[in-house]
Image (cartoon, helix red, strand yellow):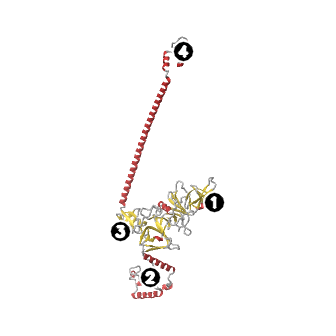
Amino acid sequence: MQGILPVSTHPHHVAFVCLMALVLGSCSEPEVLSFDDAALTTEESSTPAPAAALASQEAERARLIQEQAAAAEAARVAAAAAQAAQTQAAAAEAQRVDEARRAAEEAEVARQAAARAEFEATYPLHGLTFHFLSRIRAQPRPEARVVGYTRRGARFRVTERVGTNGCARGWYEIVGGGYVCREHGYLIAREPPTFEPVPAPPALDSALPYAYAFAPRDTVQYWRVPSDEEEQLVRETLTALHAEKENPTQNEAIQPEDEAALRVEAPPPPGSEGSEEEGAGDPALAVTDGLAESLAGALADAVSGLVAEEPEELKLPDFVRMEMLRGFYVSLDDVVEENGSRYYRTIRGGYVDATKLERNDPSTHRGVVLGDEWQLPVAFVFRRGVRQLRRNQAGDRLRNAGRIATHTPLAVVSEFTQGQRDYIEGHDGKIVRRGAVRLARPVERPEDVPEGAQFIHVDLSEQTLVAYDGDRAAFATAVSTGRAGHDTPTGVFRVMSKHVSTTMDDLESDAPYQIEDVPWTMYFEGNFALHGAFWHTQFGRPRSHGCVNLAPADARWLFGWTEPNLPPGWHGMFAPVHDPGTYVYITE
């Protein structure tokens, strides 16, 4: 009867079957016809299955957790090993880079040491200039072309003596190319020579090479610090000289017709040009002693009857260097206190009462080195009190944004007209009236300038300057060129000479001026030059006597950029005629 009835193995169902058997009179275990012994055994052994299953699940879970932990630990160990390997590799790379850097530094030190040794072997002697200015010549002979010069206090190196042609103490080759004569203002020795006082060297890395001061009223410059009595003597002498200039003495002058009767010359002194020795043996030039005596007597009588005896000439004492007029500028070396007074010593060796000078406050204006967002056109505010504007949120109106400082540069992104007024807009959103700025625009390289060559463009109408390295604009700024009657020349020129500083003056005009050590001067045509101007701030307006004035910092940048390059220790140099310096292109 197997398979006829399904029999439950649940405990409650078994108990119910037993109870029914007792009722029917048979209380033995029920015979399950459909199950074999193996099945019964299995059912009996699986009765406590839930606990075993839970235990099995826990065991399985524990095994999985253990495996996961083991895998995580293995991953951690692997990551740590990888990190350690990476760290080790990075350390090895850093060590390699450091060793390469040290090797490069050591090689550079060795290279510099070798170069220094070679330099010391080539130029073993030390030089010092003690004249205010001493020339450098192209060849070791006195008639050779002057290629440059040094100034008092300049230190430099030279070779051993290379000759004595026209220079008894010897010619020496100077660093930079050229030759100096030892007897023309130079001290040369194995160790650095010196003298007192050695003036301060020019500050070649600063906007100005020297400090400057000007005379707010007429004063005096001395060769040394004077005593109180000497100052009083100078004041009295100047008063008398000024009075004499305003009211010249009315001595009777010899008229031209009287001069004709007096054109009898006394014999020149022996040995001089035209002396009687030159005419010896020429009967036409022989003069007897008696005739000479009578001529001399006649001349003395004629002069005594026409000209009154001349008074002793009135002049300033020898310890006075010069009278400084109002507005004259000097370059300053040091401050000296002596005799209870404080004096400025100038670079040129003069002394001026410090209370009679005012220190100069130069312009801080700077141009723009072009690159990135700074590209042409660039505008420079040149008027004072200019309002800057900005667009409103909608962009259809301009609102006042306060004042903009004079000489502020703007990288122009647009030019537009609104309300019949022209404006320019800068890259930072600042907007100003077109008439308040000078605009530096790009220009094409002129035909006279070779491709790739440096050139400087000066725009007279805009009062701007742009330096070009080939066809790439490198620098832009505002300048001051010649005012009316002192026009700056137009055309293509070359930088012919460069000077750390040079004095500019005009003492004969109705408005005389003198400015010592005008900085960073680059002559390009006759007396016309590009140079720094520390005495005014009006860049963007014509103001000069014909030169191109730049703010000191701009002039310093341009001086270092242009060619020829000034060798160390030199104060000025002249470009070779066959190879002049940077091109200068000036247009209206």
State the quadrant of the C terminus: bottom right
Taking depth in this image into account, of 532 and 546 the one nearest to the observer is 532
Query: Could you tell me the amino acid type at mark 1?
Result: Arg
Q: CA distance from mark 3 to mark 2?
A: 43 Å
Taking depth in this image into account, of 3 and 371 the one nearest to the observer is 3
Residue, disc 4: 19
Taking depth in this image into account, of 271 and 463 the one nearest to the observer is 463
Q: Quadrant of residue 373?
A: bottom right
Label drawn at residue 133: none
Q: Earlier in the sequence, mark 1 or mark 4?
A: 4
Residue at x 56%, y 55% (from the top left corner):
428
Considering the numbered disc 4 on the image, is that residue within a helix, a strand or a loop? helix
Considering the numbered disc 3 on the image, is that residue within a helix, a strand or a loop? loop
Query: Could you tell me the amino acid type at mark 4?
Result: Leu
Residue, disc 1: 421
Q: Earlier in the sequence, mark 1 or mark 3?
A: 3
Whether 263 is drawn above or below 80: the answer is below
Query: Can residue 135 be seen here?
Result: no
Residue 56 position in % (x across, y down): 47, 26
Front label number (4 vs 2):
4
Label drawn at residue 312: 2
Query: Can residue 511 be seen here?
Result: yes
Q: Quadrant of residue 124?
A: bottom left
Query: Could you tell me the amino acid type at mark 2?
Result: Glu
Q: Earlier in the sequence, mark 4 or mark 3?
A: 4
Considering the numbered disc 1 on the image, is that residue within a helix, a strand or a loop? strand
Front label number (4 vs 3):
4
Dot 1 surroundings within 10 Å: few (below 14), some, or many (20 or more)?
Answer: few
Taking depth in this image into account, of 120 and 98 the one nearest to the observer is 98
Dot 3 surroundings within 10 Å: few (below 14), some, or many (20 or more)?
Answer: some
